[in-house]
Amino acid sequence: MNPTSSPKFRRRKADRPREIVAAALQIFAEKGFASARLDEIATRAGLSKGAVYLYFETKEDVFRAVVEHAIAPEIDLARAAIAAHPGPLPDLLRLLAERFVAVVGGSAVGGVAKMVIGEARNFPELARVWHDRLVSKVIGAVASAVAAAQVRGEVRPGDPRIYALQIIAPLLVGVIWRETFVPVGAPEFDLSSLSVQHLDTLLVGLLTPESA
């Protein structure tokens, strides 16, 4: 039998884009976009540099694949959970915060987020992809949940999109702190404790007296 026609070979070949994406996620988090090289990504994935070009033409294409296949599925799951949750809002926010900590706390996603922030001026396409596929989706979904809670009388009047930013921002700051300052000796904030205390504090001002 021709080895290239065996099921094992076909599965291995089909796995290569996923392996490249997983390797690129790590390299981008460790070295940033400008310093990351396709040959490093290929080596981390156990492939030749030429093999990477079979699937991606540029480093930007690899980054888009990282966003689409390594990060966006979690965003899509969060959006689905928000759409399916009837309320109350505090339960939903605590559920989302727990999932955020579980995903970001044990992965290189935080390092890639730091990369996007740090290199957006020189590589604006990174920021555009990150915003359009991830950030805008999360802000929109949380804002929709807040607006629905306002209709139910749970949340005080106010711009739902601004409320969404207030909900999300401290968690992101905790991640950026970890990725930026902890490596140079700053004490780390526990993301789980941060999320719990943040929501306990925020909900006092966010909820109506009837819902508090």
Image (spheres, helix red, strand yellow):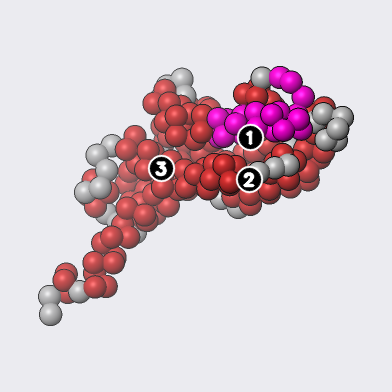
Q: Residue furthest front?
A: 152
Note whether 84 is above or below 143 in the view shown.
below
Picture disc at residue 145: 1
Question: Label 1 to label 2, Cα distance in Å?
Answer: 9 Å
Residue at point 31% right, 57% down? Answer: 16
Instruction: State the image quarter where residue 83 is shown.
Output: top right
Mark 2 secondary-structure assignment: loop
Q: Which residues are magenta?
A: 138-158
* For marks 3 and 1 on the same chain, the one whose residue lies earlier in the sequence: 3
In the depicted view, which residue is nearer to us: 148 or 194?
148
Tell me: 33 left or right of 56.
right
- Inspect the image, locate mark 2, and give the three-letter code of the amino acid beneath it: His
Inspect the magenta stretch and tell me whether residue 177 lies in it. Answer: no
Residue shown at 63%/45% (left/top)?
85
- Image quarter for residue 139? top right
Asked if residue 192 shows in the view, the reply is: yes
Which residue was labeled with disc 3? Answer: 68
Which residue is label 2 attached to? 85
Distance of label 2 from label 3 (alpha carbons): 25 Å
Q: Residue at x 65, y 32 (%)?
A: 148
In x, y percent, where is residue 195?
74, 41
Q: CA distance from mark 3 to mark 1?
A: 24 Å
Quarter of the image that includes the N terminus: bottom left
- Horizontally, is 94 left or right of 138 in the view? right
